[in-house]
Image (cartoon, grey):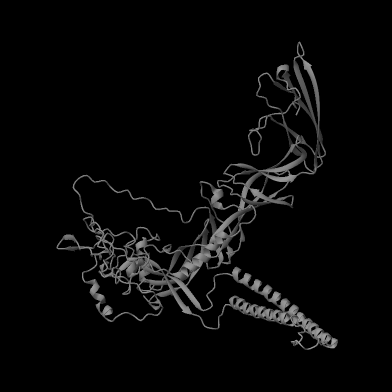
Amino acid sequence: MTAEAAQRWGSTLDSVVVYEQGAVCRRLARGSVPSDGRVRVTGLPRSLDPGSLRARVLGAPGVRVSEARVEVEAEPLGTSAPDELQHKVEQLRDEYAAAQRRREHLLSLIEEVRALHPVPPARKRDDPHRRTPVDAWLELADFVDERLTGLHTRLVEAEEALRRIQHELDIAADRLARASTDAPSAHVETTVSAFVIVDLSGAGDVSAHPDAEVELELEYGVPGAVWVPAYRLTHRQGDLGGRLVLRASVAQRTGEDWTDVSIALATADLRRGTELPKLRSIRIGRRQLASSPSGWREPPAGLADLFAGYDAAGPRPATTTAVPVAAPSWPVPPPPPLSPAPQAYGAPTGAFPVPGSAGGAFPEAFTGAMPAAAQPVQAPDRRRSGGQTFAAPAPMAPAPPGGAAPPPPPPAPAAGPPQPSGAELDYAGLVLYGPDEPGGRRGRLFPGSPFDPVAAEYRRRAESVSALRLPGHSVRPRESAGSFDHRFDPAARADIPSDGTWHTITVGEIPVGLHTEYLCLPSLETTVYATLVLSNATDQALLAGPVEVTVDDDFLLTTALPTVAPGGVCQIGLGPAEGVQVTRRTNLHESTSGLRNNTTVLDHRVHVELANRLSAPITLEVRERVPVTSEPDVRIVERADWTTPEDGPGSDRRTPGTRVWRVDLPVGGTAVLDGGYEIRIPAGKALIGGNRRS
């Protein structure tokens, strides 16, 4: 099938669903279907996952897609369309190398001039000592000084030019790394398209009008897309609600720019297996041989004679230097008999069986060709003649040196017809191997496609976004979602280029309940802390992530929001509230009681003063602590109106001995809290010299 044999349709990216890693893209194409139904839809990215292409017809009952596969075309670009960023980086690298060579040359000259010094001539034994003229010494020193001054000036200029070029090179390289990958190479333009066959036999209206347009939907998966949630919380003091805006930081390097597309966000794992197991029936009775699948035939006899002329022509001229490998002296056996390769001539006309696992990985034995000398000894082939099944004799391996016995032949295969797998029935995914392949593969169809290093490099580059550094307080959605998966659909379309950097989009507003609480632990410190109590009123969980808190139109801080289940409640700390003042004083009085003064009484008095200097009334929660004893003879008697804290977000109910005062303070109001407790210790339980008062 050539590129001109099918009608070309352009496509538009309509929507994208971004998962924890990877995305599923949806493209729409519209056009008139030709009489043969063969259409080529262009615009697909080079990094799409093999086997993930799905196609269907929208809005045309009876019209269906009978076949869809991915095809790649490449053609050289003209010199009029170079990659400017890449060209600039290469140019700056050449300039940097030239500047570095100039600097090294100047350094070598400086070392040569610095090494100049006067050398007296060789004196014979009978010659008297000769005096060196002082003027010669001074002239040499002036010459060296003048040359060094000029060379150092040029060196400073060269180093400055080297730093400037290096700075420009760093900027250009950073722009090239951050540039969108939705651009052709500087030399070759690759076009990835979907070859689709549309069946119009079941559509009466469409087939009667050849000019009628049909809309196709293409769906495919791509790696190289990640997202993390983020929030913006707006609250006004005194209100019982607020605005929580869900945002998302999305990064993608899929090779295509997402321009004006509808983006959905999901926490599911895109590569999680979803295939159901097959439950086979249990039969009681005589054994029945499995029937051969429809659309499959065994290879014909004499297939090896097809390449007799090719082998007689001799070996092909070698284009590269290779290490010669000795070929075995025995004939190479055919491939394994339990899964023979289906042949193109064995498929019925117009039949396209659906593979059992579309997009799944093929067995390793079919992923590529091995050299003849590296081929393992395979099981003998089964052939049928006259309704009977027999096994061809296995080739005899040469005896190893030393006269040792050869290894035993492999066991004969089980009786019955071969059972090809679902991958072997996927005719669109079969590859015809050429005459240079080993004898068991040449001229036969096997599942899988040859390794494409270009596509592998595109996918490797796309998957590099998974190593991006997360924004502050961000958590991977798969980690915070727990055992459940959620999907969030933004209300507006967005633009995200394929540059591998974080881009923030707005998902929507989430209704939440908010109220402010104030908390103080004066026994530790007298600072009052403000907290926002947030309740999730939706049927979806709030994922963990950073939240920007704004109170009364003033930005306060950016903190971490934990995962909040539907109907759950959490606390967000806002920091100290400087407008609320707390003062605490304590008093301890020690005495004895009892008939013989055999009980020590430690009377602790607590006095707390509160003052509200804020512009709104508040509810302040003051927490104190009471000693806890495990001795039955030691009693603790409380004398205060405090209570035990209730269950709630951030509560200290699990901490024994915690007591709480809840006081409503109006604007400018004050309050005084008095409490205390007595510790009654029998004389036999007292610690002499111990610190029992703390």
The image shows residue 269, relative to residue 117, as above or below, that is above
Q: How many labels does the image show?
A: 0
Q: Can residue 200 be seen in this view?
A: no
Q: Is residue 606 left or right of residue 180?
A: right
Q: Position of residue 159 (x, y in %)?
A: 72, 76
Q: Eyeballing the image, is 424 above or below 591?
A: below
Indicate the quadrant where residue 326 lies: bottom left
Task: Name the residue furthest left.
Answer: 386
Q: Nearer the viewer, residue 248 or 201?
A: 248
On screen, residue 557 above or below 598: below
- Which residue lies at the image location 57% right of the left edge and 65% below the top edge? 260
Image-based side of 199 in relation to 502, left or right: left
Q: Nearer the viewer, residue 36 or 122?
A: 122
Q: Can residue 118 be seen in this view?
A: yes
Residue at far right of view: 134
Pick the residue in front: 676 or 244.
676
* Residue 324 locus on image (x, y percent): 36, 74
Instruction: Name the residue at the front extreme.
Output: 126
The quadrant of the image that shows the N terminus is bottom left
Choose between 126 and 466: the one closer to the eye.
Answer: 126
Where is residue 597? Give x, y as percent. 77, 14
Drawn side of residue 421 relative to residue 319, left or right = left
The image quarter containing residue 296 is: bottom left
In the rendering, at what x and y percent does residue 496 appear?
A: 58, 64
The answer to whether 287 appears left or right of 444 in the picture is left
Image quarter (top left, top right, bottom left or bottom right) of the C terminus: top right
